[in-house]
Structures are given as structure tokens and as C-alpha cells.
């Protein structure tokens, strides 16, 4: 009798190691937090190799059961030749060194999807298929997507409003191939002030494209205008109605709706930090190490990069101590600690740092406060309505899990 | 709550702490700013401490300085050092042949290599002073070998202190006797209980943020207002003990918790480095032993209890909290 | 194709086969990029592939014996790593 294994999901502790392979991108998305994008800073192979050698030769400092080697940009697939070389080297070295990660590793990509079907990218996928996860970002309907995700000019700048050209067509043509190669993979949608009104139709549009998991979040930056929370809540309630009335809940998810949301948090038992910064490692073209890519200079508006070492001298563990001792309450204002709907309210350590009054990660930004509260109200509506519907159909609440697909998504950094 | 106002009288005012003053050219605080600083201290009910440079001040400053009750922190080579409440030795050689006075505190700023070499000189100085504060100026460079050496040095001083206490004397050496007497954290308090007025008329969290010049450490964030605007400490919560996750659970109560050194080594003012924590615990543990040893000679601090612990860096046991 | 739940293994047993599964995939992909010119590493790879394959089949054999799972001709067993459940799949 033959054997075959069909289901795999990361389990246990996992280390994320991120290569910032380029700071270049074909697009000039309006909500992009990367303020220092440019076409010059590309990760040199020698730097990547040194970073890999450092990490793999310090196995005692990286005890996590598994590893996710992340590649980000800019747009990572602009550097597919370099990525291919890096991945080959990682695999070979993990094997040569009998590293425990050889038994549990992934290569992960977040791409704009534009050159997903190129020969080089496709060859790379074929070669590394068993160890790949690739997410393509598509924001929803053409109108919503093209509102923000626009091509940059030939000179590499953001275009004038009258010259803006959306990227929807260039991405959506690759969705079927991507879903065929990575069935069930979700997409990540980012919401800022201008696109609140497109939320409902965008999520439904993504479902219609065959994407079953829509991971969606509002930006952490302080971009919200008066009344945005009300509009947001209205959109989410309309979306809730559409998902429930259309019975999409059986096979599709939208991460805005989660049962574990909007409850008070215990000061002691639920005092963990939300963000994984400091437990990750990022390296850039200069060979500097960061606690996460959001602490690299190109991601920061007002603060200096938080460098924790480099490929030559290694990691300065003292500079990780703040991240590894950071808890929820210490970085939160009293109103957040006392908040009745705190559960699920996310934060990005990098944005906290960037927005803080002084250079610290111990000061939580509350820019999304009213948006979170709006989400909680809509989320309550969603579950109350869904459970009542199931109840009326004769499905008891304890049986509901069999009838509802639930999102395991955590807010992204 | 603010209690102390440190006034740097000159750019070259002595450091009395871990940092080295990088400013080498004299620039006095203006008489107007000095007066305004004193006025601020009076209205805010702050105790004023003047920090002096090595050179004498112009005569016209004297009346202004004396217009308020204050303490004087002076380097040992200041010509008027006999007026000081706190004398700072920036070089151990200044201690040789120095004439010590009763009721004056002495600060020895010294690097680890000199500290290890001059352990006997320091042991002898304990006997000559009522209060000696030893401040190590390169704590961040301690390695495992240095920790071992430091342990031996503290043992030598502990034996000396025990002998003196057995003789009925009660000299104080911050590194070993402070912890014996403390029942809660007693740290430097920069940004919380004290603030610094610099010769540029601006307030700073502590003198180090004015007198050092590292780009990595210094940020406008550590300016804390001006005489015109008043004191405004940015992210002021970070200077409070309850916002320091490692320190709030720690019982090395005598540790300076130097916010400047924290910023320099970990980039956060509320987070100490591994070296800082280990050094503080290498001092804490023999303090416990010293307390027990002194009690063998008679009753001493009977209410005090220092528990035995098996770690040197609280970071290593953070999961147990 | 039909799928039928026929048993369940312990988490420890699941971890064992999951690790072998991952290793086998890693070795397969490595084989595509390692050439015989890198003699020492290539030999290590070939040896490891043999050993891992043997352990892999050994796990299924010993578990099948231990749990006496239902089987059919031309069928195969599958494991769900999330639930530790074993399924019989028949074409």
C-alpha cells in the first residue's frame, strides 16, 4: 500500500529571517509605508551569503523548530536570479551543516504579482515547490485596487494624478495560475481612509476570483479622518450581510470577522506583546541586521533605523533586550489597558516606534483606536446574525464550527 | 515627581557618573540663565545641585550661586574643592595624598582596568572616607573574564568592610553597603526625580545627554524643555520603575539604572544591558554575604533580608515572572 | 476517489513522520541542484535519501502493524498533520 501525506501547516516555534532583496518596485502604492524606496539598493550576493553563514553557524542562538526565509522588497521578484542563488545556497548549507532547520523550512514571498508568470519566476517555483509560500496582493475590485496600487513613472517617481495608471489588469491575469499552483492561499488587503467605501464589494470580488481567504487590515498609520469609523462600520455590516445571506461563510473567510475579538484583556494572563519584532531578523543591502524590516531606515518616517548588528560582527543581543521584555501593558496607555474591547486590537512595533514621542518601542500608537471599535461592533453583528441564522436552520452553536470556515489570520505587521 | 535640579555651571563641568564629558572648551552658563534656573528651582520647590568645572568661576557668579540653598559637586582639581559636598575623582591618581573631610561624599570615576589594578588603594580609601561611591566608566565593556575578576575585587573590599564594621566603624561603599540598607529601588532618577539644566539654557534628562555626542545615543528626544517653556520630559513614563520590565522585578536595589547607559547599550532608556545587570548582581550577592558576616559581630540592620538567588541577569529568568 | 477515516496516531508519532516528510522533500529538491562534481556532498545526499526513504516507509509499516488500519488493494493511507488522523484513500 502506498502512502501519501496531504496536509501541512507550520507548527511549533518558527523563526522568520527576512532578506530585503531590493528597495525597488514597479509600483508606487499610495499607502506604502516604505518611505525610502529606491532602485539603487539591491542586496549584494556577498552580503546575503554572509548573513546565511552567520545564522546557520550560530545554531545555538536560533533554537526555533523551524525557519521561514522571507524575501521582501520593494518587489522581491525583481531580484529572482539573486533569490534563486540564495535559496540554493540555504538548502545546500543547511544540509551540509546537518542543521536542524533542514527538516523544517519555508521560503516565503509577498509579491505584487506583476511578473509572477515570468519564465524565471515559474522555474523558481517549480524548483522549490515543496517549500514555497507565495502571497499576491490584490486589493479588491479594479476601482479599489487601482485607487492605490498604481504604476510608478519611468523615472521612478509617483505619477501626477492625471497620469496615474492602475495595476489591476497586470495582477489579476496571474491570479488563476497562482491559485492553481498554491490552492487555498489567501491574499492580503490593506485599507486606508480613501478606500473604506470599497470594502464590501472588494472582498466579494476577491471571492469571485476564487480566493477563499481574504486577509484584510486597516493601516496602522495615523491617516484616519473624522467619520471614517462610521463609514467603516457601515461597510463591514453590509459585508456581514452579504457573506451571511450569500452563505459564503461555509467556504470563505474574511479576517475582519473573528470570534476572538472585542473582549477585555486580562492584565496578567493576556499581557503578551502582539508583534513579533525582535523574534524575527531582517538583513538589508548594507548588511545590517534589524529586529524586523519595519525598523530599517527605508520604512521609517521620523526615526533612525534600529540596527541590532551586521553580517560582519553578528547580533548585539543587548539591542534585542527591549523587544524580548516588551509586554502589552507596559507599552499601552491606561485607556488601552482598561479598554472593554481590547482583544484583537493590533499594533505594529515599527509604527509605534516611528510615531512615538521619543525613540522607543515602549509607546503604543492608538491611531487605529476608533477603527478597531467600529470593527468590533460590526464583528458582534456578524456573529450574532450568523449564529441566529444557523440556529433557525437547526444547527446548535456548539455544532456551528462544522458549518463555518474560520480565519486563523493574525493582523500583519 | 521632580525633586532635584542639577545645574551644569560650565560645558566642562565634571561628570559624576558613568559617561565621560566630551566637551573640552569652557562655556559658562550665562548669569541670566543661572538666575532663571535658580528661580525655576525655587518656584518648583527643587533642591539644587551645582556641578562645577575644574576652573574657578568668575567672582560675579558667587552671589548668584549663594542665593539659594544648594549642594556643590566639584572635581577634585577645582581650586575651591574644600567647599564641596561631593568631590569627584576623575583619575585615581588624584586620590593619592588627598586630604579627606568628614561629611563629604567622594566619587571615584574609574575604568575597569584601573579598578582591578587599584583595588588595594580603593580598599584603603574606604577607611578614610565616610562615603565612597565608585563609578565604573566602562561597564558596557565587561566580558566574562572581567566579571570573574570583579567578583574577586568585591570580595577583597567586603572583607575590608567587615573588619571595619567589626571595629565599630561604619564606612559606606556604594557597591556593597547601599544594597544592605535599601528595601526598594533607589536609582539615579534621571528624568523622574531629577532634571539637568545645561549652560545652553535647556533642560536635559541628565547631564550625559548634553555632554556626550554620539549620534546613536543623543536625540532631540532627550532635551527636556527650556527655561522659557519649562520642563517637558518626552515619553516620561519610561523613566518610571513600573515601565521598566526587567528592573521592576529586580532586587538589585542599589543599581544606578543609568538611563544614558541603557540608551547607549540597548537603545531604550528603560532597559539595562546584560553587562549592567550582571555587574549589579555581582555587587548584590556579596552585599548579602557582607550583611550576614557583619551580623556575626553583633546586631546589624535586623529587619533587612536579602534573599539568595541563582541568577546574575534577570533577563535569563524572565519567563519565570 | 473516496476518503475514509481509519485511525489516528499520537502527536509524537505524527511529528516523527512530519519531520521525515519534510526531510524527504528537502532532499528531493536538493538533488535537483547538487551535481556529482560536488563529490562529498553528493554522496552524503544519496546516502541520506536512502536512509530517509527507509525510515519513512518503516514508519508506515510499523504504524500499520500497531494500529491495524483498514486497507484495500490500490488504496493508500494519508495523514492529516493538523489532526493526526489517518485516512484510507481509494481511487
Image (spheres, coloured by chain):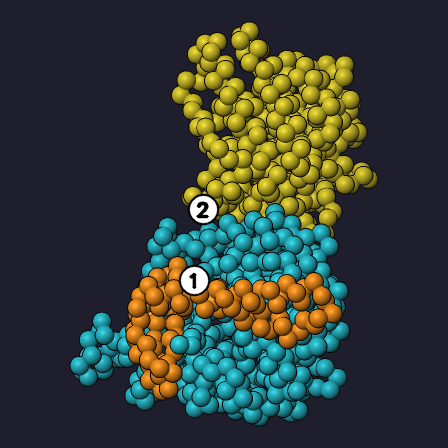
Q: Is residue A269 above or below residue B117?
A: below
Looking at this view, is B9 or A20 the one in front? A20
* Chain letter, orange in picture: C
**Residue B46 spot, x, y in % from top left:** 55, 35
Residue A300 shows in the view: no
Task: Estimate the x, y position of residue A236 in percent, counting from the top left.
Answer: 38, 80
Q: Residues within 10 Å of mark 2 (few under 14, many from 20)?
A: few
Residue beneath the point at 43% across and 22% down: B304
> Which quarter of the figure has residue A170?
bottom right
Q: Which chain does tag 1 point to? A: C
What's the chain of the residue with tag 2? B
Q: At x 55% / y 67%, what residue is drawn?
A: C50
Secondary structure at badge 2 equals helix
Q: What's the CA distance linking mark 1 and mark 2?
A: 26 Å
Q: Colour of chain B?
A: yellow
Q: Quadrant of the N terminus of chain A?
A: bottom left
**Nearer to the camera, A56 or C89:** C89
Same chain assignment for discs 1 and 2: no
Above or below, comparing residue A377 to residue C74 in the picture: above
**Residue A313 visible in the snapshot:** yes
Q: Residue at x 60, y 58 (%)?
A: A98
Q: Please tell me the numbered disc located at residue B319.
A: 2
Q: Which label belongs to residue C15? A: 1
Which colour represents chain A? cyan
Amino acid at each position: 500500500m502506498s502512502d501519501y501525506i496531504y496536509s501541512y501547516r507550520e507548527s511549533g516555534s518558527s523563526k522568520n529571517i527576512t532578506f530585503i532583496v531590493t528597495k525597488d518596485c514597479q509600483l508606487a502604492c499610495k499607502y506604502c509605508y516604505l518611505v525610502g524606496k529606491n532602485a539603487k539598493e539591491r542586496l549584494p550576493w556577498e552580503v546575503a551569503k554572509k548573513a546565511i553563514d552567520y545564522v546557520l553557524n550560530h545554531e545555538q542562538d536560533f533554537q526555533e523548530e523551524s525557519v521561514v526565509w522571507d524575501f521582501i522588497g520593494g518587489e522581491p521578484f525583481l531580484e529572482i536570479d539573486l533569490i534563486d542563488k540564495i535559496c540554493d545556497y540555504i538548502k545546500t548549507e543547511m544540509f551540509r551543516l546537518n542543521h536542524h532547520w533542514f527538516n523544517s523550512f519555508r521560503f516565503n514571498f509577498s509579491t505584487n504579482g506583476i511578473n509572477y508568470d515570468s519564465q524565471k519566476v515559474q522555474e523558481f517555483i517549480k524548483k522549490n515547490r515543496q517549500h514555497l509560500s507565495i502571497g499576491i496582493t490584490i486589493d479588491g475590485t479594479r476601482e479599489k485596487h487601482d485607487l492605490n496600487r498604481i504604476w510608478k513613472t519611468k523615472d521612478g517617481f509617483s505619477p501626477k494624478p492625471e497620469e496615474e495608471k492602475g495595476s489591476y489588469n497586470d495582477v489579476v491575469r496571474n491570479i488563476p495560475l497562482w491559485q492553481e499552483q498554491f490552492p487555498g492561499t489567501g491574499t492580503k488587503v490593506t485599507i486606508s481612509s480613501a478606500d473604506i467605501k470599497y470594502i464590501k464589494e472588494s472582498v466579494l470580488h476577491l471571492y469571485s476570483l476564487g480566493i477563499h481567504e481574504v486577509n484584510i487590515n486597516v493601516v496602522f498609520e495615523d491617516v484616519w479622518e473624522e467619520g471614517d469609523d462610521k463609514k467603516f462600520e457601515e461597510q463591514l455590516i453590509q459585508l456581514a450581510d452579504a457573506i451571511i445571506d450569500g452563505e459564503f461563510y461555509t467556504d470563505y473567510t474574511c479576517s475582519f470577522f473573528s470570534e476572538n475579538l472585542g473582549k477585555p484583556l486580562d492584565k496578567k494572563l493576556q499581557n503578551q506583546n502582539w508583534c513579533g519584532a525582535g523574534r524575527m531578523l531582517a538583513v538589508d543591502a548594507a548588511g545590517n541586521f534589524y529586529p524586523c524590516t519595519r525598523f530599517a531606515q527605508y520604512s521609517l518616517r521620523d526615526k533612525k533605523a534600529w540596527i541590532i548588528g551586521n553580517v560582519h560582527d553578528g547580533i548585539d543581543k543587548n539591542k534585542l533586550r527591549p523587544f524580548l521584555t516588551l509586554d502589552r501593558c507596559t507599552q499601552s496607555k491606561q485607556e488601552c489597558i482598561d479598554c472593554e474591547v481590547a482583544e484583537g486590537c493590533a499594533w505594529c512595533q515599527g509604527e509605534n516606534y516611528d510615531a512615538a514621542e521619543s525613540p522607543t518601542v515602549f509607546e503604543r500608537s492608538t491611531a487605529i483606536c476608533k477603527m478597531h471599535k467600529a470593527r468590533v461592533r460590526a464583528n458582534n453583528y456578524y456573529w450574532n446574525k450568523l449564529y441566529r441564522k444557523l440556529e433557525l436552520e437547526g444547527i446548535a452553536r456548539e455544532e456551528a464550527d462544522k458549518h463555518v470556515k474560520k480565519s486563523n489570520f493574525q493582523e500583519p505587521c | 515627581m521632580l525633586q532635584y535640579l542639577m545645574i551644569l555651571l560650565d560645558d566642562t563641568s565634571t561628570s559624576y557618573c558613568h559617561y565621560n564629558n566630551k566637551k573640552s572648551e569652557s562655556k559658562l552658563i550665562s548669569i541670566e540663565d543661572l538666575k532663571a534656573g535658580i528661580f525655576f528651582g525655587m518656584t518648583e520647590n527643587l533642591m539644587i545641585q551645582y556641578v562645577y568645572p575644574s576652573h574657578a568661576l568668575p567672582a560675579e557668579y558667587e552671589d548668584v550661586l549663594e542665593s539659594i540653598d544648594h549642594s556643590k559637586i566639584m572635581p577634585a582639581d577645582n581650586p575651591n574643592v574644600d567647599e564641596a559636598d561631593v568631590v569627584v575623582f576623575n583619575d585615581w591618581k588624584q586620590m593619592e595624598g588627598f586630604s579627606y573631610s568628614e561629611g563629604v561624599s567622594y566619587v571615584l570615576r574609574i575604568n575597569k582596568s584601573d579598578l582591578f589594578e587599584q583595588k588595594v588603594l580603593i580598599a584603603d580609601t574606604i577607611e578614610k572616607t565616610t562615603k565612597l561611591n565608585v563609578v565604573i566608566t566602562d561597564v558596557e565593556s565587561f566580558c566574562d573574564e572581567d566579571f570573574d575578576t570583579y567578583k574577586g575585587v568585591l570580595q577583597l573590599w567586603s572583607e575590608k568592610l567587615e573588619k571595619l564594621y567589626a571595629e565599630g566603624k561604619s564606612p559606606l561603599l556604594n557597591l556593597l553597603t547601599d544594597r544592605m540598607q535599601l528595601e526598594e529601588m533607589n536609582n539615579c532618577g534621571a528624568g523622574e526625580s531629577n532634571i539637568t539644566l545645561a549652560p545652553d539654557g535647556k533642560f536635559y534628562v541628565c547631564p550625559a545627554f548634553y555632554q556626550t555626542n554620539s549620534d546613536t545615543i543623543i536625540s532631540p528626544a532627550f532635551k527636556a524643555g527650556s527655561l522659557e517653556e519649562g520642563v517637558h520630559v518626552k515619553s516620561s513614563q519610561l523613566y518610571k520603575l513600573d515601565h521598566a520590565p526587567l528592573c521592576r522585578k529586580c532586587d538589585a536595589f542599589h543599581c544606578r539604572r543609568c538611563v544614558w547607559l541603557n540608551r547607549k547599550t540597548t537603545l531604550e532608556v528603560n532597559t539595562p544591558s546584560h553587562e549592567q545587570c550582571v555587574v549589579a548582581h555581582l555587587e548584590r550577592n556579596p552585599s548579602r554575604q557582607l550583611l550576614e558576616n557583619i551580623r556575626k559581630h553583633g546586631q546589624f540592620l535586623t529587619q533587612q533580608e536579602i534573599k539568595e538567588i541563582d541568577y546574575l541577569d534577570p533577563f535569563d529568568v524572565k519567563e519565570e515572572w | 476517489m473516496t476518503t475514509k477515516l481509519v485511525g489516528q496516531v499520537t502527536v509524537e508519532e505524527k511529528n516523527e513522520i512530519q519531520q521525515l516528510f519534510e526531510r524527504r522533500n528537502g532532499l528531493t529538491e536538493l538533488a535537483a541542484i547538487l551535481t556529482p562534481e560536488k563529490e562529498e556532498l553528493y554522496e552524503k545526499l544519496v546516502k541520506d535519501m536512502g536512509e530517509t526513504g527507509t525510515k519513512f516507509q518503516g514508519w508506515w509499516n510499523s504504524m500499520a502493524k500497531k494500529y491495524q488500519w483498514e486497507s484495500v488493494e490500490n488504496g493508500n493511507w494519508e495523514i492529516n498533520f493538523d489532526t493526526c488522523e489517518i485516512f484510507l484513500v481509494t481511487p
